[in-house]
Amino acid sequence: MKALIYDGIETLGYRDVPKAEARDSEHLIRIMASGICGSDMHAYLGHDDRRPAPLILGHEAAGIIEGGPDDGRRVTINPLVTCGSCAACVAGRENLCPHRQIISMPPREGAFAQYVTMPDSNLVTVPDHVPLTKAALAEPLAVSWHAVRLALEAIHPKMERTALVIGGGAIGLAAALALRAMGVEDVTIAEPNDKRSAFLAERCGQTVTDKTTQPAAIVIDAVGYAATRALASAITNPGGVIAHVGLGEDASGLDIRRMTLQEITFIGTYTYTAQDFRDTAQAIFENRLGPLDWIEERALSDGAQAFRDLRSGAVASPKIVLDPWS
């Protein structure tokens, strides 16, 4: 099968590799769409020791089961494989499973390939009316759905619902969409890239600013740098909530004194539960997250150039989705 291989820092190769083979109780899935995630970019830049070269990256995917009794079933993939029996899994917090694996990290190769294998419990059936390019967005949308759900559960019920999302990439845009789907109407995205900011406003109908001092009750940091954490802790309203989902860098930025004195809740949020993933997929199927027409489609064979374009800031769209068969 063809695959896009991470061979080293800022080096990707498109070549033949052995076809994936389904393990016991797993399905072989013909990948039809696979999105480029920020974590793929971190690996590409050599910033993620969990993803050593050589490795097939990619974990935002949808496709068609090939072979077996479910042959032809259209599915979107929850890439987080968990044990199902630990305390976290039993409590419905599978994202905290100490034995969790995710495709695109050893020992599981990723979805920048024509095939992957997954357990049935990680698959959600996609209705025929939903394009698989949209279904592949279930994973990044679920990350933000989970973050927004935790933030809304944490905030005081009588606080005014205003929200600022820091970062206008796929996770940031997804957070804005999830906030509105869950009843928060006053949502602004802070995005400094002029090209992306214009895209979010004109194509996605979002309220966007390149810088902000306007306070908000809920702040979603979808970037995760020291500067964005400093902004979040400065502008969150007293008694408000910061949901930190970005993984840009891992040091400094928070104003702990202000957060303590103003009783600002900080939530570190990672991936999603299995229920969050299913709920997000259903929201996509019911069009509750909008038309999701803001993706850019490219061939997997052009994946190396797509990464270079993302690296240079030349891509306006929040998400590039790769087609392994073109």
Image (spheres, helix red, strand yellow):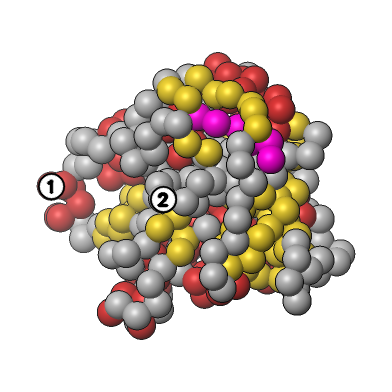
Residue pointed to by mark 2: 107
Q: Can you give x and y, in whole percent of width and height, for residue 154 in the image?
A: 35, 69
Q: 82 above or below 162?
A: below
Front in this rendered view, residue 208 or 87? 87
Q: Can you give x and y, in whole percent of width and height, for residue 163 in the image?
A: 48, 53
Quadrant for the C terminus, please: top right
Residue pointed to by mark 1: 257
The magenta segment: 1-6
Quadrant for the N terminus, please: top right
> Residue, x 35% and y 30% (percent of image)?
47
Front in this rendered view, residue 234 or 150? 150
Q: Are marks 2 and 1 in contact (CB under 8 Å)?
A: no
Does residue 114 belong to the magenta stretch? no
Please name the amino acid that badge 2 sits on.
Pro
Please state if 183 lies on the left or on the right of 251 as rendered: right
Front in this rendered view, residue 31 or 87? 31
